[in-house]
Structure formats: C-alpha cells, structure tokens
Amino acid sequence: MKILVIIGSPKGKGNTYNAVKKIEEQITKLDTAVEFEYLLLKTTNLQTCKGCFQCLKKGEEFCPIKDEQKQIEDKMMNSDGVIFATPVYVYNVSWIMKNFIDRFAYISHRPHFNGKHAMVIATTGAVGLKFVLSLLSFEVGTWGFSVTQKLGVICPPGKVQDNDAKKLYKNTEKHMIKASKAFYNSLSTNSPIKPSFIKLISFNLQKYAFFSADKTLADYKYWENKGWLKNNAEYYYPVKTNFIKKLICKLIVKVWYLNTPRPSDLKAN
Ligand SMILES: Cc1cc2nc3c(=O)[nH]c(=O)nc-3n(C[C@H](O)[C@H](O)[C@H](O)COP(=O)(O)O)c2cc1C
C-alpha cells in the first residue's frame, strides 16, 4: 500500500512534517508494508496560478505553465491514499498549500479521484485548526477525495509549563494514534464512503450547471463522457440515495438557480 504525503509548509521539514512522520511511525507499526512518499511543496517545481482560465475552459493540457503539475497529479492518482498537511497561517492554509489547491482548480469542476481516501492534517501554534481542517477537507473533497480523517496538532511556539505540556503532548499522542489507526483501516477496507447530503447537493448543482453549459467547454465534455449528465446519475460513483433525499436535492437545485447565474456563461475561447 502506498501513501502520498503533500507537505504544505514553506519551512519544509518543520512541525507539520514532524507530525506526519509520527503518523507514519504509527501506521508502519500496524503494517510494515505501507510505503510513504513525501512531496514537500517547498522544493517542488509548482509555479503560481496565473488565473488565465485555460484549464477550466479548454482543459488542463492548455495550462501555459510548464512545471511538475502533471507529475503531481499522477502521483496522487497512483497512490492508495493521500495525506494533505498544512500549517495554520493566519487562520488559513499556508500560501504554498493554497497555490497547490489553485493549480488543481479544474479538478473541482471535473473530479478525478472517485472517492480515494484521504487524511488532512493541520498544525498550529494555538488556534485556527477547526476552520483550516474543514476548509482543506472541503477543497480536496471537491476533487473527489473522501476525507476519512482530520487531525489537528498544536505545537506551542514558546515554553509551556511542565504540567500543561505533559497534558498537551499526551492528548496529541492519543489523537495521533487513534487517527493513524482509523486512516489505515479505511485504506485497508477501501470501501466507498457514502456521500453526505451536502455532497449530494453539490453534485446535483454541478450536474445542472454543466448540463446547460456551452458544449465546447472542457467541463461539459468531461461530465458527458463520465455519464454524470444522465438522468439516473446520482453521484460521481454508484450510490443508493433514498427518494426523499433525491427530491430535496432537486428542489434545492431549482431554488438555487432561480437567482444565481450559471457557469454556462463561460465561453471556451
Ligand atoms: C506566517 C505565520 C502565520 C501563523 N499564523 C498562525 C495562526 O493564525 N494561529 C496560530 O495559532 N499559529 C499560527 N502560526 C504558527 C504555525 O501555525 C505553527 O508554528 C505551525 O506548526 C508551523 O508549522 P511548520 O513548522 O510545518 O511550518 C503562524 C506561523 C507563521 C509563520
């Protein structure tokens, strides 16, 4: 089994890297055959997104930037699970992690990862974990990852009083062991995760938007090829949804598009 780790710290091997190394230690205790590959965004040739829209309109192959983007996507594709890890920078992910997310923005329109399991990790000096973990898991969720574990790690910058420090490290260790086991188990079973109601709504909103989109757009072609524009397509992969949920999704889509412009206004040029 192969786990790819994306480290989004501008420092490289700092607190975030060390936190993931501890997860690796726990997982390899459970199974020595699990391989970890680390991708430090700091030392990766991934240039900044220029906002030209070519990937969204025409296709990712039209991105004018020539760097390691495609190799990174292939690495994510060829792994059994991915760990996305970032420090909290002013209540957000680091800039280097945000750029990584932006460079793959087209995957939010054309999800590739089919429910592949992922874990998100954030480290912080004190605050911001909850928000950053939700943000990052939502974002990689739009690429088709199923985030099965979210782990926040507090790494206090200064000296911590003896008793407080002991309590914090003990608690952190407990959470790390629990999250490592749960992530390893989710990878071992590898069963598709039932999407939340919000995810079903999000699929239906995109389906409606792309159904009526300009047919020359990369998004339309992708959704059409995948069969996701068909009447009976309920999600990116086969799931069973009950009648009430389906009905509520339809209603929400109708109400949503009464007042919101659709991405079909985009033109592929
Ligand atoms: C520019 C910058 C902004 C930060 N913002 C926050 C913050 O909003 N809240 C917080 O508790 N810690 C904040 N920190 C502390 C880091 O989140 C913390 O030290 C983290 O573990 C660093 O991880 P790294 O060593 O992998 O880069 C910030 C650190 C830096 C350098």
Image (spheres, rainbow, N blue to C red):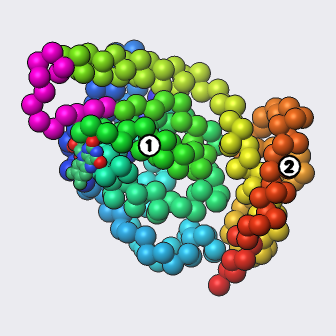
Which of the image's four quarters has the C terminus? bottom right
Q: Residue at x 58, y 50 (%)?
A: 143
**Residue 219 falls in image quadrant:** bottom right
**Residue 248 falls in image quadrant:** top right
Q: Is residue 7 visible?
A: no
- Please name the amino acid that badge 2 sits on: Lys
Direction from residue 130 to residue 145 in the image, left or right: right
Residue 157 magenta-drawn?
Answer: yes
Q: Position of residue 229 (x, y in %)?
A: 83, 56
Which residue is more in the foreground, 241 or 78?
A: 241
Which residue is more in the foreground, 69 or 230?
A: 230
- Please name the amino acid that badge 1 sits on: Phe
Is residue 29 shown above or below 244?
Answer: above
Q: In the image, which residues are magenta?
A: 153-165
Direction from residue 112 to residue 44 in the image, left or right: left
* Callouts 2 and 1 close, C-beta under 8 Å: no
Direction from residue 37 to residue 264 in the image, left or right: right
* Dot label at residue 250: 2
Q: Position of residue 151 (x, y in %)?
A: 40, 31
Q: Residue at x 54, y 36 (%)?
A: 147
Q: Which residue is mark 1?
A: 131
Q: Residue at x 49, y 54 (%)?
A: 73
